[in-house]
Structure formats: C-alpha cells, structure tokens
Image: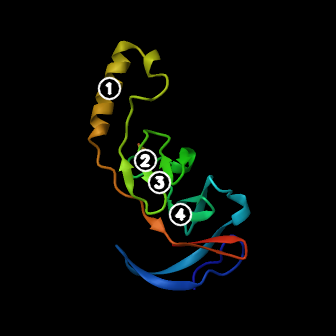
Amino acid sequence: MGPASPSGRQPYPVRLRHGSAGMRELTFVDVAAAGDVPAGSMVHVKAAGRDVLLANVGGTFHAVSDRCSHESALLSGGRLDGAIVTCPAHGSRFDVIAGRNLSGPVMADLPGLEQLSPRARAMAREKAAEMATARVADLPAYRVRVENGRVLVEI
Ligand code: FES
C-alpha cells in the first residue's frame, strides 16, 4: 500500500500503470476538500509528488498535469474558461477533461511587448516565430472521484 494522503487517510490500490520503470500501483490520493474548489475554479495540488491541476468544471472535478508541456509553467496560474486552461507563460491552451492540447504557444498578445526597444521587439518576434512551430504534447489526465466531501485523484 502507498503512503498516507495529506489527510492522514490511506489511499487504496486500484490498478497498475505501465511506465518507464515498469508496472506501478495506481492509487487514489486525497488532494482537496470539494468545497475548496468551487465551480469555475482551479487549484494546484500535489499528488504522489506530482504537480496536478484540479479543476471544477460545472460541478464536475477534473485533473491533469499542472505542468505545461511546452516549458513546464504551472497551468493553474493561468486562466480557466469552461474546460479550457490557458498557460500563463506563452498562451498554449489545453482542455482539462482529457488533457488535449488545443493550441500552441503565442507571444504576440503578451502585454508590454510594445514598450520594448526595437531590438528587443525583433528578438521577441523571432522567439514567437520559433515558438509557433513548437510541438506541444497533450497533458496526462487523471481519474477523479469525490468521496465524503473529499476529492481523490488517481495517480
Ligand atoms: S510554458 Fe506554457 S505555453 Fe510556454
């Protein structure tokens, strides 16, 4: 059995997942009180040492990796619109239900760009063009359940 959850309750084994280190046990880990994440909001939680974004979309909880697959920014610091999270760093968008990447990084809309020197703006445009070709992977998505007012994430 795995380590105790932050609440002190024991997570319970459910199934195995194949990883680079072979098969490992998956468990549901207690990550938050359901009442602490109202509909339309998201929070960063830790589960089994991983950064997880927990979102409440219309009363249903969803969990995906909280690390953007572009350059690892914490997505929970971004914006949640319905089921879509926008990365605060460069604007990649993901759906928080399946973790699918919907669009890649952009830089053109970053505030303050017009205040840069011409040389810095040119460098920013160059970086934006480079980023526009970046391949951004889908995020790992985790199963979620709610029990006794607590949100559990399978990880
Ligand atoms: S780190 Fe998220 S889009 Fe760049």
Residue corresponding to mark 2? 93
Q: Secondary structure at mark 4?
A: strand
Mark 4, mark 1: which one is toward the viewer? 4
Q: Earlier in the sequence, mark 3 or mark 1?
A: 3
Q: Residue 120: give x, y in percent of width and height.
A: 37, 19
Q: Is residue 1 above or below residue 66?
A: below
Q: Amino acid at mark 1?
A: Arg
Residue closest to the eye, 132 or 80: 80
Q: CA distance from mark 3 to mark 4?
A: 12 Å
The three-letter amino acid code for the residue at tag 3 is Arg
Q: In the rendered structure, which amino acid carries the disc numbered 4?
A: Ala
Label 4 lies in ligand 1 vicinity (Cβ under 8 Å) = no
Q: Going 59% across and 84% down the picture, which residue do you hit?
A: 12
Q: Are marks 3 and 4 in contact (CB under 8 Å)?
A: no
Q: Which residue is mark 1?
A: 125
- Which comes sooner in the sequence, label 4 or label 2? 4
**Ligand 1 within 8 Å, label 1 CB:** no
Give x and y (percent) for residue 9.
70, 79
Q: Mark 4 — residue? A: 63
At which x and y percent is residue 54? 58, 60
In the picture shown, does residue 16 fall above or below 33?
below
